[in-house]
Image (cartoon, grey):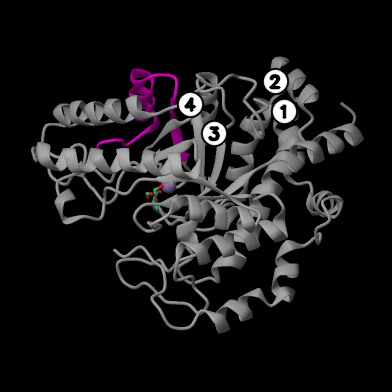
Amino acid sequence: MTSPDRREHAKQVLREQRIETPSWGYGNSGTRFKVFAQAGVPRTPEEKIDDAATVHRFTGVAPLVSLHIPWDRVEDYAALAEHAQERGVQLGAINANVFQDDAYRLGSVCNPDPAVRRKATDHLLECIDIMDATGSDDLKLWFADGTNYPGQDSIRERQDRLAEALAETYARLTGEQRLLLEYKFFEPAVYTTDVPDWGTSFAHCVALGPQAQVVLDTGHHAPGTNIEFIVATLLRHGRLGAFDFNSRFYADDDLMAGAADPFQLFRIMHELVQADAVSGVPATGSSTGQPISFFLDQCHNIEPKVAAMIRSVTNVQEATAKALLVDTEALTAAQRSGDVLAAYSIVKDAYDTDVRPLLGDLREDLGLDPDPSAAYARSGYFEQVAAERVGGEQAGWGA
Ligand code: LRH
Ligand code: MN
C-alpha cells in the first residue's frame, strides 16, 4: 500500500472508530486522602450524559457513554436512553458495582457467606434487566473480591463461588448481550485478588461460553508487564472483548489515556491494527462475533473533566492513527528476514509521525473543528455549566 493509500485507509478506519466515555469520569473522584469538588460537575446521570454528548460533539467519535450502577441508578432507564438519544449519544456498557456495600467486606460473589453471594449475584442480574431497558449489549464486571492475609480464605473455593455466580449471570444473557470480565492484579485486596490477571479471566470466560470475553484495563497490570503481548494473545483466541483505556505511572492511577505512556498506547493499537480490530469484528475472530469495545476508564481528580475526556479521546485517536501508518508489508518482510533494526525502525518511524494534520483533515471532513480541545475551550460550555449547576449534590463515587 502506497503512503497516500495508507493515509486514506487510516482516515477510513479512524472515521469508524468508536470510543465510549465513562459516566463516572464526569463526576468527582479522588483518592483516600481527598476527593476535590470542582465547579460545573454534574449532579445527575442526565447531566453526566450532557457532558458525554459534549465530548462527542467536539470529537465526533465518542457516541457512547458507560453507566455504573448504582452511581447512575434512575427510575426510568428507557427515559434516560431517550435523554441520551436526543443529545446524539447512546447508553453503552452497564457496569455492576459489588464493591461498596458493608456486606462485601469479605467479598461479593466470592464471599464465604452464601447470603452475601446471593445479594451480589442478584445485583448482576439487575444490571442485565437494566441492559434490557437501555438496549445495551455489554455487561461489564469488575470484582474487588480478594483477601488480605494468607489463610484468610480458600483460594480454590473462592474460584468455585465465582464460577457459580458467573454461570447464573451468563445464563440470563439474551441476544447479542455479552459478559465482559475485567481483571486487576491488586487493590483494594492486597494478598489475593480473585480475578487478578488475564489468564484467570480468560479461563472463566472459556468455561462460561462464547458470549463471555475479557476486559483489559491498561492500569491493572504489574509494573513491567508487556500489555501488547496480552492483547495479541487474547485477539488470537477471539476473547478480547473490551479495553478500559487510561494511563498510570505507578498503580491504578486512572490518568488520561496516553498521558503517562503514549508509546505503550501506540504499541497496543499496533497489535489491534495488525489484527484489523480497531473498528468492526477483529480479523482474528471474536467468540461473540462483535467488535471490541473501546472504553475510557479514568478519574479526573484535579483536572477539568470534560476537557480531560476530549484530550483522552484525541490521544487514543493519535495512537491509532500512528499505528495505521505502519508500513505493514515492509514490516512483515523485515520480520520474516530477521532484520531486527529495520523492523523496529518501521514501527518507530510510524510512531514518530505527527498525525495531527491527518486527524485535523478527518475532523474537517466530518464538519468538525480540526482541534477539538481548542474548540471546546472557546465554546464556553464549562463556564455555562459552572453557572447553571449550582446547588444539589455533585455526582461522585459515594465511597
Ligand atoms: C476498577 C475499575 C473498574 C470500574 C472502576 C470504576 O479499578 O477499573 O473498571 O468499575 O474502575
Ligand atoms: Mn476499569
Q: Element type at marker 1?
A: helix
> Quick one: label 1 or label 3, which is nearer the N terminus?
3
Instruction: Residue 323 in the image: state x and y as whole percent.
Output: 71, 38
Q: How far apart are marks 2 and 4 (CA)?
A: 42 Å
Res 386 visible: yes
Q: What residue sits right under mark 4 in the picture?
A: 175
Tell me where residue 296 appears, x and y as whole percent.
53, 50
Category of crowding for the residue at label 2, using alpha-carbon neighbours closer than 10 angstroms: few (below 14), some (14–19), many (at least 20): some
Q: Residue at x 59, y 44 (%)?
A: 265
Magenta highlight on residue 82: no
**Relative side of 110 to 384, left or right:** left
Q: Earlier in the sequence, mark 4 or mark 3?
A: 4
Tell me where the magenta segment starts and ends, as one range. 192-216
* 1 vs 3, front mark: 3
**Relative to 234, residue 31 above or below:** below
Which mark sits nearer the N-terminus, 1 or 4? Answer: 4
Q: Which amino acid type is marked by label 1?
A: Ala
- Tell me the mark number nearer the camera, choosing from 2 and 4: 4
Structural crowding at the residue carrying mark 4, measured as other residues with C-alpha within 10 Å and reported as few (<14), some (14–19) or many (≥20): few
For disc 2, the marked residue is 335
Q: Residue 343 carries which label?
A: 1
